[in-house]
Amino acid sequence: MNENEKELTMEAPVHPDYAKAVAAVVHSKRTRDEKLELLKDFHESDIADALPLLTESERKTLFALIGEETASEIMAYVEEPAQYLKEIGVDAAADLLENMDADDAVDVLENLDDEHRLAILKEMDEEAR
């Protein structure tokens, strides 16, 4: 290992558990603005990984806190989105999907049961469908 590789290895984090850190921020007694500022430091995939660690109520609070656009970015990283989309309701799910890249939205919709997919599509703007 050369000197540059040693420096990079020494400076690299040792596998921090970002999902638990995101959950800790959500669970904290910090103000809304403080939480939002801390959450900006995490990648959308880290926040997506934290969703199973939160209660339904905490997830709803998180989505309201971060806003529709960021929630859309996070949903693109969620392996099984159906549960979370059902929690936020058809109207909010439609809005969220409208803000996603088309290919990500299609991936999410393909993972939903027919009834839920059709209900969401019905609420989406015609352009977004």
Image (cartoon, grey):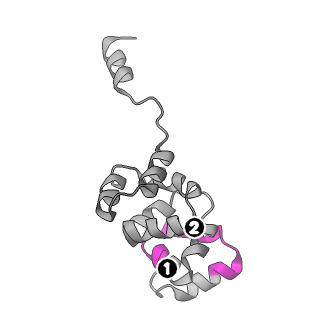
Using the numbered discs, state the Cα–Cα distance from disc 1 to disc 2 in whole angstroms.
15 Å
Q: Indicate yes or no whether the magenta region holds residue 34.
A: no
Q: Which residue is drawn at 60% across and 72% down?
A: 109
Within-10-Å neighbours for mark 1: few <14, some 14–19, many 20+? some
Residue range (magenta): 94-117
Q: Which residue is drawn at 45% across and 29% down?
A: 14
Tell me which label, 1 or 2, sits earlier in the chain.
2
Residue type (three-letter) at the residue carrying disc 2: Glu
Q: In this view, does 107 lie to the left or right of 37?
A: right
| Label 1: element kind | helix
Q: In this view, does 19 lie to the left or right of 70?
A: right
Q: Which residue is drawn at 63% across and 69% down?
A: 82
Residue 92 image label: 1
| Label 2: element kind | helix
Give 54 or 9, whichever is nearer the viewer: 54
Give 24 or 85, whichever is nearer the viewer: 24
Within-10-Å neighbours for mark 2: few <14, some 14–19, many 20+? some
Mark yes or no: residue 69 visible. no
Residue type (three-letter) at the residue carrying disc 1: Ala
Q: Percent x, y for residue 19?
A: 50, 48
Q: Choose mark 1 or mark 2, whichever is in front.
A: 2
Q: In this view, does 120 lie to the left or right of 14?
A: right
Q: Name the residue under label 2.
A: 56
Principal SS element in the magenta part?
helix
Q: Is residue 117 left or right of residue 27?
A: right
Q: Residue at x 38, y 28 (%)?
A: 12
Q: Percent x, y for residue 13?
A: 40, 30
Mark yes or no: residue 62 visible. yes
Q: Percent x, y for residue 37?
A: 30, 56
Residue at the top extreme of this rendering: 2
Residue at the front extreme of this rendering: 29
Q: Is residue 14 above or below residue 94?
A: above
